[in-house]
Each structure stands twice: as C-alpha cells, then as structure tokens.
Image: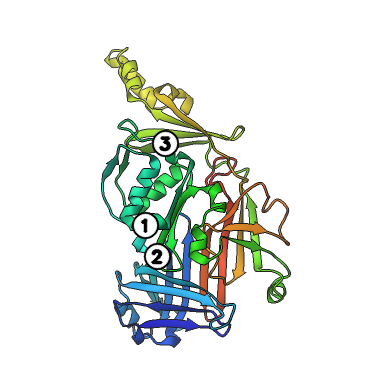
Amino acid sequence: MSLALYNHDGTWFKVTSKDVNLETVMTPDVMSLSITEEMAKMDSGTIQLLDRNNIYSRILRPGVKMYISWGTRLGQPNASQRNPIEVMINSPSGGGDGGGRITFNCSFMALQSRGSQLIKWYETGTKADVIAEVMDRIGILPSNREINFARGSEGITSGTKICQNESDFRFLVKYADEWRAAFRTGTDQKGNQIACFVDYAKLKTSDFVIKMTGSGSTHFEYGNGYQSILSNKANVLEYTWQDHSMDSANGQGVRIYEADGQVQMLTYNVEDETVTTWRLDPKKIEDELKLHDMAGQTKLMASYLSAQTFEEVKRFFIEDTTTTAPQGSGITVDAKLMGDPTVTASMIATFGNGFPPRIGAKDRTWWIRKADHDITTAGYFTNVSIADAYAFSPTGQKI
C-alpha cells in the first residue's frame, strides 16, 4: 500500500507502510514532501496532505512506521533516486486556512537510529571501543560503519570513565561534539543502516556517503539563473555566504560543561589554534577551606560564587589536555539547487564558477552539513548548508 506524488518534470516521491492502508489516501490530496538530513541529527521531515474530511489525521497517527523514497527523471536513463528510509510518525499537526482549506502535516523522524535508553559506565578499552559498542546496540554492523577519529585510541580507565545516561544516538552526538568528530547515521543503497564517526578532515576520504548515494562529493557552479541550469552549465540557482570570523558570541572564549559528574572548561586560543581542557579538582577547594575558620570559609565561598572571570578560580582546576584544533575559516555557504537526491549531509563540496575565490579555498575540506529536499507540485528543490571541515570558527563560535 502506498501514496505517491509524480510531477510533470519527472520528480517523484513514494511512501509505503505495513501499519496502515495508504490506498485510502487520494493522490490529488498529496501536496508536498520535505526531508531534512543533517550532521549529528536523525533524518526528519513532513508530508503535507489536503485533509478535507479529517480522515488522514485519524489514519496517520504517531507511532506508525513508513518507508519513504524519492527521485528525479522517473523512467529515464539518467534517473537518480534515494532508496527507502524507515521513519516513524511523530508530532503531526494540521489546521484550516481562511479559504476553508484543511491540511494535515504528517511529521516523521528516522527513529531507527535512536537505539536504547540506559545508564551505563564505560571504564575499560578505548574511546573507539565505546563508540563501536554503542553502534552495536543501534544495530549498525561493523561492515556498515566507519570509526576513525584522532582521539579514538585514547584509553579509558576508572579515573577517566564515561557515563551514559541518555539514548544511544544522543550519547554519540554528545561525544562527537566533545571529541571533535563528524557523526551521522543513514541508509545505504541496499537499505542497510550505516554510520560514520570520523574526524572532519577524514570526510574527504570516507566512503560513508558513497554507500548512501553512490557519490562522495558534489561540485557547485553558479551561472545566470535558470538559463545556466537548463544548459547544464550550472547547478546552483542562488546562494548566499557569510564570514563569521569576527563573531564574538563566546565572550572570553570559555565553554563550561559537565562530563562524568565533573565540571570541565574548554578555553579557545585563536592565535595558536589550541584547545585546553580544565578539569575541576574538588580536593583543591577542600584544602584551601581547611586553612580557615568558619567565618573565613564563609567569606571564601562567597568569593568563589561571585567570581566573574576564569582567572579568579583557575587555581581549583587541573590543566588536563592540550590538543591542536584547527579553527576553520568561519565561512558558511547556503545554496539552492534543482532537486538532486544524490546530495546529502556529510558529502564533500567543491566550488567553481560564480563563487568568490575565498569560497572553496583549496587548503580546506568543505562539506555539506545540512540538506533539505522539498518536493511539491511545483517541482523539486534541494537547499544545502556548507562549511569547511572544522566545527569551530576562528573565534571559537560553533557554526
């Protein structure tokens, strides 16, 4: 049982489900499909239906599983498509407009990547071993994953143990951020679940997106609007770029977070591109308090709580590690393309005609961090967000 939308230009999407009878969905009621693919997030999207009699809102309830595929140039030699991804309906919505038209938004997420929800301590092995164990629970086979990040060989002991108290997917997202790795799950061309957890720079040699789409990179050319597209001289309809290098969102360049029950700080040094980790040592506070009577301890605690800068409390922290951390160019690019199902997040991007020389600098790896696929009766368009291969701008602001 399925519902589908086929456009005059050959673009299409198809939805099937074993949970509900989708034949009850009238083809003229299918309005659009929107799918978002983003690094470190589960794929999500919405199917919009014209729901004249509020039938679809009763059939397509939260928890219903569906399989969604989409593509271009149906039946033609140069056709391309994305094989079905498994999703689950969640948080549907709807409404009526001033013209009496009632719509139903069937929102969904690729929840097969979520994994289990548990509390667990990791005290042995390496960081790469931890990532592999979590991927095992999600159901990603060793042959369908790539784990290759610089800190993966670091050992874990009882003194550096790691606590998991969230879903497997959320755990992988958290430590990809902390260990500066690119993480994403997806589905290969055979329908198997796949994943990568690699250094951003290694995306250039990763075969993750090749398994998903058959292509590991995409080239962007901008010309004179639609005419250039029609003549196959360009694939970018429009684009914008922004340089974030003077942003100062992080103030003093200090990020405070909690790991394994301990307060830690990351300080960013732009000049020599380093990141220093500071770990709170409660014993240092205890030792200093022992040097004073009750009144003195009260005064000290008041000074701790009123501290305005890191330097005022720095003596209570241990400089844990210092690692090189290239900060990136700080440039992001947003582009609108004619619909292309082979374009996805984590794909390497290269730039040609129509872009300023500073965009796509050859000394950096540029990658798609987000791709939105939108198919309506008007056609199919893909919008992408692109950055260089490092997660932080020169100011330490995460982009």
Mark found first going from the N terminus, 2 or 3: 3
Q: Secondary structure at mark 1?
A: loop
Q: Position of residue 354 (x, y in %)?
A: 73, 62
Q: Position of residue 108 (x, y in %)?
A: 38, 68
Tag 1 residue: 141
Q: Is residue 295 left or right of residue 37?
A: left
Give, as a three-letter code, the residue at label 3. Glu
Give, as a three-letter code, the residue at label 1. Leu
Rounded to the nearest angstrom, the CA distance separating label 1 from label 3 is 23 Å
Mark found first going from the N terminus, 1 or 3: 1
Marks 1,2: beta carbons within 8 A: yes
Q: Residue lying farthest front?
A: 143
Q: Residue 192: which disc?
A: 2
Quarter of the image with the N terminus is bottom left
Q: Quadrant of residue 69?
A: bottom left
* Residue appearing at x 53%, y 46% in the figure: 391
